[in-house]
Amino acid sequence: MGDRVKQTLFAILEPDLGDAQVFDLFAGSGAAGIEALSRGAAHVTFIERDADACRVIRANLERTHLASEDVRIVTETVGRWLGNPPRALFDMAIVDPPYDQPAELVETLRQLGPHLRPGGRVVAKHPTVTPAPRAIGLLASERERRFGETTLTFYRREEEP
């Protein structure tokens, strides 16, 4: 995630981060979740399918002195993890799937709603040329921010129908 995109993302999310339970989906190096922890999130669950990337997340947490009981790293595909019944309800999710797999974004958003508390927030990072759905499952889009080839779409989890 580029510095400008990350700065804008966390400037928007920071008021809601205090004591938040956060998902970092398609976590990669863990940069988004680590930033959430450094800004007051109470817990972050990192979901990343690549075991080497999970080792990098662990190392980055150690390096930033943010490794704790309030962190969970799961080596699993996002689809498989979200396909199970919710283990806990989260306040916020950051979704950054591979750009070359646009269907991953749509499927993740579709599955994500039941894992969030009502009113929970989701931010999806995606290519500007591949628009995100306005509403999907329990999520409704609130706003978009564009940064050239990258767009952040912000969602809010609605009440159950």
Image (cartoon, rainbow, N blue to C red):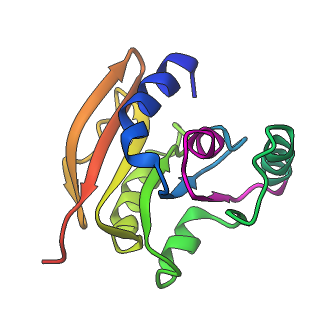
Picture quadrant where residue 14 is located: top left
Residue farthest left in this picture: 161
Q: Is residue 75 magenta?
A: no
Q: Residue 71: where, in percent of width, then height?
A: 69, 61
Q: Residue 113: where, in percent of width, then height?
A: 33, 67
Name the residue rendered at 67%, 63% in the picture. Answer: 70
Q: State the residue in front, 97 or 27.
A: 27
Name the residue rendered at 20%, 43% in the picture. Answer: 142
Up/down of 150 relative to 152, above or below:
above
Q: State the residue in front, 73 or 35.
A: 35
Picture quadrant where residue 136 is located: bottom left
Image quadrant where one finds the N terminus: top right
Q: Residue 45: where, in percent of width, then height?
A: 62, 61
Describe residue 159's horizontal placement relative to residue 76 as left or right.
left
Q: State the residue in front, 100 or 37.
A: 37
The region drawn magenta spans: 32-51
Describe residue 141's horizontal placement relative to residue 22 as left or right.
left
Describe residue 37's horizontal placement relative to residue 117 as left or right.
right
Name the residue rendered at 66%, 38% in the picture. Answer: 31
Describe residue 41's horizontal placement relative to residue 124 as left or right.
right
Up/down of 82 relative to 147, above or below:
below
Up/down of 4 relative to 158, above or below:
above
Q: How many marks?
A: 0
Name the residue rendered at 47%, 80% in the picture. Answer: 86
Image quadrant where one finds the C terminus: bottom left
